Amino acid sequence: MPFFIRGSRSVLLILSFLLTVGLMGAAHAAVPLMPVEEIQVGAQGIARTVISGTRIEEFGVEVLGIMKNKGAVGDLILVRTYGDVIERSGGVAQGMSGSPVYIDGRLIGAIGYGFSLTDQRTAMVTPIHDMLKLLDRTPVKALEPPTVESIDKKELLATPLMAAGFGTNALSFLQLKLKSLNLTPYTVGDPPPDIAYGELEPGSSVGVQLVRGDVSLGALGTVTYVDEGKVLAFGHPFLKRGQTGFLMTNAYVFTTIRGIESSFKVGSTGEVIGTISQDRGAGIAGEMNLYPGVVPMRMNI
């Protein structure tokens, strides 16, 4: 990915590269699950996310319908969100992707899709059973870099891409080149140094880093499911890269900004805590305390 640094300085970049690290074996449900077949129109539940700091908050969800074969791998659940959190965030915001949704205490899936320039309280949920299949993936060959045509962007919640260390011209270049991949880069600073992140849990913010060092680039989303160190998040593809070796980090949210087209979280990636090893239609999957290979690089510009 192209980048530019203004001035003359040494830059240490750590670029995560694709591994053949597989998450193998069937997933064992850490919480009770509800399949799509049991979900009733009009049913109400709750979802969890972070809109500021690291504190997980809950908001209401009402099922409006089941959209057959609408998603990247199957059905989507159409929902209306409501409550104080949604009012404060300006609707379903970029960065809420992966927010777990529960009905009667049973996990039904993750918010993964929304609508821009319209009622931002309406969203679509990727069923949890489709996401759990990511944990059964065996190692595969690295895929070719994704093309614009390979990523279905219809109603996909844009993923906030947090960029640090980039000059104005470099950021403009990134925004232009990444728009077609439904990625929205914006500049951020470091999180407060005294943050106590704690263990990832459903509703926590999670980061996916591509570049780490004096220049950093990473995405922000929400954790859907955690079981014995294995993590599911996003509810939609990041880069639709298949088998991956991205850096998994915890994340801090400075605030959530209301927008005309769509609202979005302003956050920053934190410490590296594991590997994102699957990036597919139903979301991303990874494992904590399992670290990817990296390429150290030092440049003088």
Image (cartoon, grey):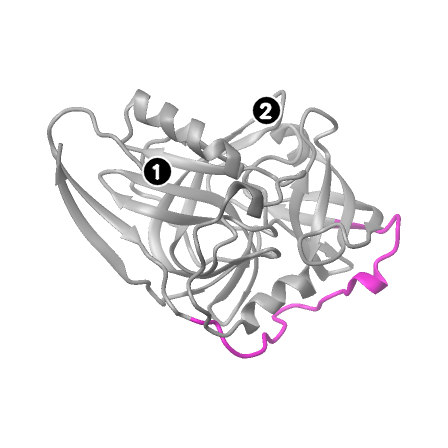
Q: State the residue at coordinates (61%, 49%).
A: 99
Helix, strand or loop at disc 1?
loop
Gap between marks 1 and 2, in whole Å?
21 Å
> Secondary structure beneath disc 2?
loop
Residue at 36 percent of width and 31 percent of height: 188
Amino acid tagged 1: Pro
Q: Position of residue 168 (x, y in %)?
A: 31, 21
Prevalent SS, magenta region: loop
- On-image quarter of the N terminus: top left
Which span is picked out in magenta? 22-45
- Answer with the quarter of the image where residue 29 lies: bottom right
Q: Are marks 1 and 2 in contact (CB under 8 Å)?
A: no
Q: Quadrant of residue 233?
A: bottom right
Q: Residue furthest bottom?
A: 25
| Image location (x, y in percent) of residue 132 | 62, 67
**Which residue matches tag 1?**
191
Pick the front one: 261 or 198: 261
To which residue does mark 2 refer?
258
